[in-house]
Amino acid sequence: MSLRIMIVDDSPAMRSFIGRIIQLSGLDVVSCVHASNGMEALTLLRKQRVDIVLSDINMPIMDGEQLLRELANDAELTSVPVVVVSTDSTDSRRTRMLELGAKGYVRKPFAPETLRYELEMALGETHG
Amino acid sequence: MDNVAVCVELEAMLEAATSYTLETMCFFGVMGPLEEMPAGEERISARLTFRGDANGVFHTMLDLSAAWAIAANFLGEEVADVSRSRMEAVVCELANMICGSVLSNYKKDGHFELSSPEITGAEEAQPDQAVRRVFELEMGGIALAMDLRPKP
C-alpha cells in the first residue's frame, strides 16, 4: 500500500528531517504533504486524502491539541490517524494527546526506528 | 531536594539529552565533557525561555564549524548547500529538543511551555548561576546552560 503522509510542524527544518527519515524508513511512501500549523493541515486535509498525519503540538495559529479536536468533530476526517511528534515528553501531555484521539506519540528527539514503529502501529490499528 | 542535588541531576540530564539528540537526530558524535569551549572559533548561540512547573532560560552555544556540520547532517545535505538561515533554524531546533528533553525528565508529570528559540549574539554570556555543561564534539564544541528561576 502506497502511503500519503502529512507532516505538520512549524519548523521547516523539522518537517524536512521527518520527511527524509520516512523516505529512508522502508515504508512505501508515495508522497509527504507539509503543513506549518493545524489550520493549514485542516485546509489541506479537506482537499486531499492522506493516510496518516504526523503532528507537532506547539505551533502558531492552531496547535496540535486543537487540530486533534477539530479532526474528532469532522465526520469526514475523524478516521484519519494522527501520531504526535513533540519535544514535550511529559506523561501528562502524552496522556492528554492520546485521550484526544492521537494513535501514537513520538518524543523528540527520536531514533528513526521509533518513528517507523509508531507509524506502523497507528496504520495497523487503522487499516487492520 | 536541595540546590546542589538539583544541579547534579540537571547536569546529568543535560549530558544525556545532548548526546542522545546529537547522535540520533543529527548523526553527530559527542566525544566527552570539557571545562570550557575551545578557544579561537567563531560561535553561534540560541536561547529560549520556558515556564510552567519550572521557569527559566535555556542557552545553547556552538562552534560555527560544528553548527554547519550538524545542520548539514540534520537536513541530509552537503554543508555547501545549507544556507545560513537554515543552519540557524537547525541550531534553534537543537536547543528546543535538548531543553524539552531535559524538562520532561526533570518533572515527568509536569507541564511546560517553551518559547520559540531565537538566535542571539554569538558571545552572549551564559548566566553564572545556571547549570552549565560543555562538550567536545567530533568537530568543535557545544556549551549548554539552564538557568532555573523562581516562580514569580
Image: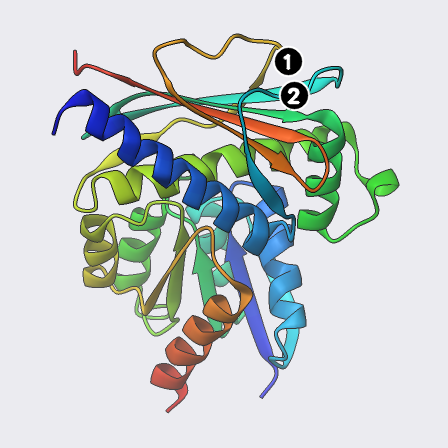
Residue A67, relative to residue B13: is it above or below? below
Residue type, numbered disc 2 = Ile
Its colouring scheme is rainbow
Residue that carries the numbered disc 2 in the rendered image: B44
Q: Position of residue A26 (x, y in %)?
A: 63, 79
At mark 1, the secondary structure is loop
Residue placed at 79% from the left, 50% from the top? B77
Q: Chain of mark 1?
A: B
Q: Which quadrant of the view contains residue B67? A: top right
Q: Judge if badges 1 and 2 mark residues of a common chain.
A: yes
Q: Which mark is residue B122?
A: 1
Q: Position of residue B91 (x, y in %)?
A: 60, 32
Residue type, numbered disc 1 = Ala
User: Left or right of B91: which side holds A38?
Assistant: left
Residue placed at 56% from the left, 41% from the top? A11
Q: What is the residue that sits farthest to the left in this orientation?
A: B1
Q: Position of residue A88 (x, y in %)?
A: 33, 45
Badge 1 vs badge 2, beta-carbon distance below 8 Å:
yes
